[in-house]
Image: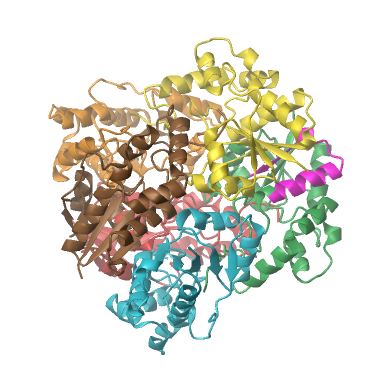
Chain colours: A orange, B red, C brown, D cyan, E green, F yellow
Amino acid sequence: MSSGLMIGRFQPFHNGHLKLAHQILDECEELIIAVGSSQFNFTFSNPFTAGERIYFIHNSLVESKIDLSKVYILPILNLENNAIWIQHLRSMLPKFDSIYSGNKFVQELVSSGSETCVVHSPVFHNKSHCNGTNIRMNIVMNKEWRDFVPNAVHKTILDLDGVKRIKVLFETQKDGIGEIRQYPEVK
Amino acid sequence: MSSGLMIGRFQPFHNGHLKLAHQILDECEELIIAVGSSQFNFTFSNPFTAGERIYFIHNSLVESKIDLSKVYILPILNLENNAIWIQHLRSMLPKFDSIYSGNKFVQELVSSGSETCVVHSPVFHNKSHCNGTNIRMNIVMNKEWRDFVPNAVHKTILDLDGVKRIKVLFETQKDGIGEIRQYPEVK
Amino acid sequence: MSSGLMIGRFQPFHNGHLKLAHQILDECEELIIAVGSSQFNFTFSNPFTAGERIYFIHNSLVESKIDLSKVYILPILNLENNAIWIQHLRSMLPKFDSIYSGNKFVQELVSSGSETCVVHSPVFHNKSHCNGTNIRMNIVMNKEWRDFVPNAVHKTILDLDGVKRIKVLFETQKDGIGEIRQYPEVK
Amino acid sequence: MSSGLMIGRFQPFHNGHLKLAHQILDECEELIIAVGSSQFNFTFSNPFTAGERIYFIHNSLVESKIDLSKVYILPILNLENNAIWIQHLRSMLPKFDSIYSGNKFVQELVSSGSETCVVHSPVFHNKSHCNGTNIRMNIVMNKEWRDFVPNAVHKTILDLDGVKRIKVLFETQKDGIGEIRQYPEVK
Amino acid sequence: MSSGLMIGRFQPFHNGHLKLAHQILDECEELIIAVGSSQFNFTFSNPFTAGERIYFIHNSLVESKIDLSKVYILPILNLENNAIWIQHLRSMLPKFDSIYSGNKFVQELVSSGSETCVVHSPVFHNKSHCNGTNIRMNIVMNKEWRDFVPNAVHKTILDLDGVKRIKVLFETQKDGIGEIRQYPEVK
Amino acid sequence: MSSGLMIGRFQPFHNGHLKLAHQILDECEELIIAVGSSQFNFTFSNPFTAGERIYFIHNSLVESKIDLSKVYILPILNLENNAIWIQHLRSMLPKFDSIYSGNKFVQELVSSGSETCVVHSPVFHNKSHCNGTNIRMNIVMNKEWRDFVPNAVHKTILDLDGVKRIKVLFETQKDGIGEIRQYPEVK
């Protein structure tokens, strides 16, 4: 059974991700969605918890009529040792034959190991608006973002009071170096 | 939407686990299966990787006609700090209202926190044969184990050459203190 | 018994912190001072060890006639998982009812959990000079800093040869990205 | 200023510990109490959290009329690397000149480093009843334990429903290898 | 260039290890000696630090006239995730083609991965006396051990006052479960 | 026996490092080369694995006619707790008497501990071209770098397809904050 893997932080899961999910299911019998940086949350770069992101994705796929019996949605911890990244994925995920990624770093990691895994380019990669950072910045600036995400994501962000969360995280972390974890201490 | 959680190491997923999954879906709208000790593998107590265990469970549920759009199967890392165990679960899983567990330790952890989560007792808990340790020992002793696990688990263990794996792990770790992680070093 | 918590890195403990300690003891029966980022030291952002910072604070309170039988001064490790930050504090500290913090991030973390803890604003928060980063920069630039800290802190920094330490850390880390841990390696 | 250090897990703090605290304050100007294994809790060997244990000790000293301005009560994480244990203590605690311990392992670690720290023997060490493991077992067996601990500890254990906690931990972990961390999973 | 790997904890390095080193250099152009459990020390099972063990081995090889330009002696940390053990070794060591080990667990780990590495059996494996545990027990019991180790190891253990160290570790840890890390705390 | 230590990340090992190795062997009987940040690899700042770097260094020394029986080349993990850095080195390395470093931070760390270790300045430190960052940037820009590294390093980088690796890492990480670990995820 062929199985295709896509990997992201999904902060949040957006329409570009959803299109890639459909592409993989057109080309493979199974889809694995790995939610990276799963240990991080409540930072501007990673506002949502692993549990919230998995909930987003699950419901977006259901809403999009994808048959969940063909899908795995699983969290992945980041490792410091990039050289064993592929094997770390293999130990934490069901078997996969191909990775869908336009990232040359992924291609480098795969080709430098003893892996036989194929790297495919996503068809709809990097469309300008469908980008997690843009969507979070649009939320901060009160700009349009609803059309860039599945309805299930939009609804859940509202239910979680996620707009306020993202604004607070931006405001309290903007002086810093952004991506770096920020701790809630008195300066 | 009500959601029920069950937690195990699933080494391997067996018919008692499957019955509990059915019970939860009879009583809740959603089922979350958390795969504990997910960082461990290739020890006698934890022979299968997180990815393999998730594959077992997914296919057992499909085989058992469970609608996967109502189910989350997710790995959980163990923590040293038990006092924050429930909140750790909350951050890594979608929202849940109740935990199905006959374990008094779980009840103690839940009741000692600020949690409002309900703990339910499984109906089919602790039937004698359906116990991961017994099943692994039966595999070692060439005794009956096929009837204690779903067909999908039986087939996958054979496909993975899992009988040999469990026997080797038993043989190379039996002198030691068992559950403790064993390293593949020359003595 | 009511108990109020204040949290900081205390690099170093300054007069603004001391005023907040007095405010909390006016409003609560007990004061807990949590020393964050306790695992870091000998960086420009965190020049002093946890032990040194606790010594600073203890002696500043004694000097300021605060009754130590009402006070806890305790180190806290940073966590990657912000979503469980409050429960992590609860497991490592005695019971507290309120957190004194002007930081909206703290308010967000508290309100997004199942916590009933109250967040109070410090009265004397964020006075311009009483800020750890400013004080460390003033030490580097040979500017005034003595009046911004309790005598006990001033004396201890001198005893520890802390002025030289801060200058060396600034000089050897200034090319880098500052807050990031710096390792004493040949480039 | 001379400063004496005592180290324990304090599960719970008992009268032998209290006597040692008095001895140190008779012989030194300051007392540092380091609460080891602080990251563990809700196991039979370590039933109480670091915060609870610090609360025990603080209130036992207050009750015993010890002047808290001469005392530090601080948590310590265990390290895997024993060879740097003394320096780890030095980085996390205020300066100390002597360690009060009857344990030869402590003496070995101190003498094998470049330390000039003195190791003193406690006068009241190892009296038969005043032993954390015995006290926890007596609690499990409904035997006498009240006279072995300060009133403040007795009262707090009751307030925390600690007798039930210890019994549940004993009952759910007794089949295992005891000290090893136990996870609240379905078998 | 062919390269053979041997792995051990080397507590201490003994004559059986030395014979295996010679065997590998007879059959391969390069020898890699990986010192496992390198993060542990000052326990009865792992009395010597990584640095001490590397010093032992280096000097035993020099004494045995082995050309060090063909040898790498390197520490390895243990991992919890056995499934990526081989790749972890690959990232931390120079390239190797074969592993010399009589341990079936090693064979299992190698054969279950995507590795093409060959596992060879040591010729002189498991001779009764040449076994680290036996040698440490003989040291405790004042029995013969000098003939089981290279002179360089014997001399270094004496220089380090290692006989006393091993006896103290045995005495202070014997009540416990041995291999488990022991902390120097008051009971 | 006198022993001198040099510490670096060696990304890559260059002629300045080699000169320092010769200087130390002129002044001491033994040389220890500690490879820092050994847990990092496949980032632009740390493109090569610990194993690859150790292979570089070993072969550069052999090529340069250094007697390897006088040399230790060993990986070191970075620690968060700088205050125990020297003792961490002591536990992971054979005994050393002096550190060769022009870095004031190293001098600060040594002088603030209870260490008696001497810090020597390298004679050939900080020559403009012989700098790991410059060499990696020159590789990215197709500028001269061959003359700055030993032949063994040049050859091995080509064998590993290291030029492509460094270019890919630069290209995929340049938008970020550089030194920070980069994960191979879809944005």
Q: Is residue D2 left or right of residue F98?
A: left
Q: Quadrant of the N terminus of chain C?
A: bottom left
Quadrant location, the C terminus of chain C: top right
Residue C134 location (% of width, % of height): 30, 37
Residue D9 versus residue E155 in the image, above or below: below
Q: Residue at x 69, y 21 (%)?
A: F152
Q: Is residue E172 left or right of residue A6?
A: right
| Front one among B18 and F97 | F97
Q: Nearer the viewer, residue F2 or F35?
A: F2
Q: Quadrant of residue C100?
A: bottom left
| Residue at the extreme top | F143
Which residue appears farthest toward the bottom when viewing the image? D144
Along the viewing direction, whichever of F75 and E89 lies nearer the viewer: F75
Q: Quadrant of residue D164?
A: bottom left
Left or right: C90, with E126 as reference point: left
Examine the structure image and report whether residue E63 is included in the region drawn in magenta. yes
Residue E126 visible in the picture: no
Would you identify the image quadrant in which residue E84 lies?
top right
The residue lying toward the viewer, choosing from D85 and C27, is C27
Q: How many marks?
A: 0
Left/right placement of residue D87 relative to residue C64 reads right
Instruction: Decide whether the magenta segment is chiefly helix, strand or loop.
Output: helix
Q: Is residue E109 above or below residue D161?
A: above
Residue under the point 54% across and 63% down: D97
Image x and y of residue B91, in percent: 29, 51
Q: Magenta residues?
A: E52-75
> Picture coordinates of residue C54 (x, y %)?
38, 56
The residue lying at 65 percent from left, 44 percent from top is F117
Residue D161 visible? The answer is yes
Residue D8 image position (x, y, % from top left): 48, 70
Q: Is residue F126 magenta?
A: no
